[in-house]
Structure formats: C-alpha cells, structure tokens
Amino acid sequence: MNWHDIALVIAGIIGIGVALVHGILIQRGIVRPLVKPDSQFANDKIIKRIIPGLIQFSTFNWILGGIALIASIWFERDIRLVTGLLVGSSYLYGTLLNFWGTRGRHPAWLLYAVALVLIAFGVTSSSS
C-alpha cells in the first residue's frame, strides 16, 4: 500500500463518516418531523413513504462513494480515476452546498474538502 492508496482509503473513511452523521441528523431533524402523524403530510401515504428515501439519498450516495474509494485501491489507475471523478463530484456538491447553505458554519464542507484533496492526490499516480 502506497501513499496514494492511503489517501483514497482516508477519503473513503471521511466520506462514510460524514455520511453516517449526516444521515442520523437528517433523520432526527427533517425526516421524523415530516412523517409524524400531525405533519402536513399526515394523510398522504405516498409522500410519507417517499420523503425519507429522497432526503436520505445523499447519505446513501456518499456511503457508497466511500466504499468505492476504498475498493478502488485494488484496481487499475483508470478505474481509480473514474471512481475518483464520480465520487469526487458527489463530494464536491456536498462541499459547496454545505458551505453555501450554512455559510461555512457546518464542519461537513471542510471534511469533504479534505476528502477531495485526498482523492485528487490518490488518483494522480499509483503503481497498480
């Protein structure tokens, strides 16, 4: 395992960690209030079923991205690059949206920015 592999693994761990915390906070703060019996959607069963999945989609995507980054260390450089581009675009979106939406007061944007730097380093060169 070289430094590029380590960078990808750390980026994946950061992504998974932030996604898990994000998922818990989103579930508690947004999903539960929207699907509780006295919410505005109390009588709309379709909306109550689909809201949690839609709101948690980024959590699911970021976790899978982290797993893909970690798994990419066993593949060739081209596969690492494609993985880095796909996962990096997802993490970049999370970075920008968190920074803009919270005016920089939420640590997720900084953690995903670190993960992006690690991804960029991890895919630049390796001995795969």
Image (cartoon, grey):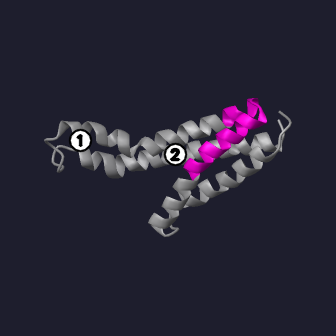
Query: Dividing the picture into quarters, in which one does residue 15 lie?
Result: top right
Residue 82: x percent and y percent?
Answer: 67, 40
Label 1 packing within 10 angstroms: few (<14), some (14-19), many (20+) = few
Residue drawn where x is 13% and y is 41% of the image: 43
Quadrant of the rendering where the N terminus is positioned: top right
In the image: residue 127, left or right of residue 63: right
Q: List the residue tagged with mark 1.
A: 47
Distance from disc 2 to disc 1, alpha carbons, whole Å, reads 24 Å
Helix, strand or loop at label 2? It is helix
Residue 10: x percent and y percent?
Answer: 69, 44
- Main SS class of the magenta portion in the image: helix
Residue 68 in view: yes
Viewer-proximal residue among 1 and 125:
125
Tell me the amino acid under the disc marked 2: Ala
Range of residues picked out in magenta: 70-91
Helix, strand or loop at label 1? It is helix
Residue 73 painted magenta? yes
Q: List the residue tagged with mark 2.
A: 19
Residue 105 painted magenta? no
Residue 64: x percent and y percent?
Answer: 55, 36
Tell me the amino acid under the disc marked 1: Ile
Residue drawn where x is 26% and y is 49% of the image: 33
In the image: residue 76, left or right of residue 23: right
Going from the N terminus, do you reach mark 2 or mark 1 first? 2
Viewer-proximal residue among 99 and 125:
125
In the image: residue 79, left or right of residue 4: left
Question: In the image, which is nearer the foreground, mark 2 or mark 1?
Answer: 1
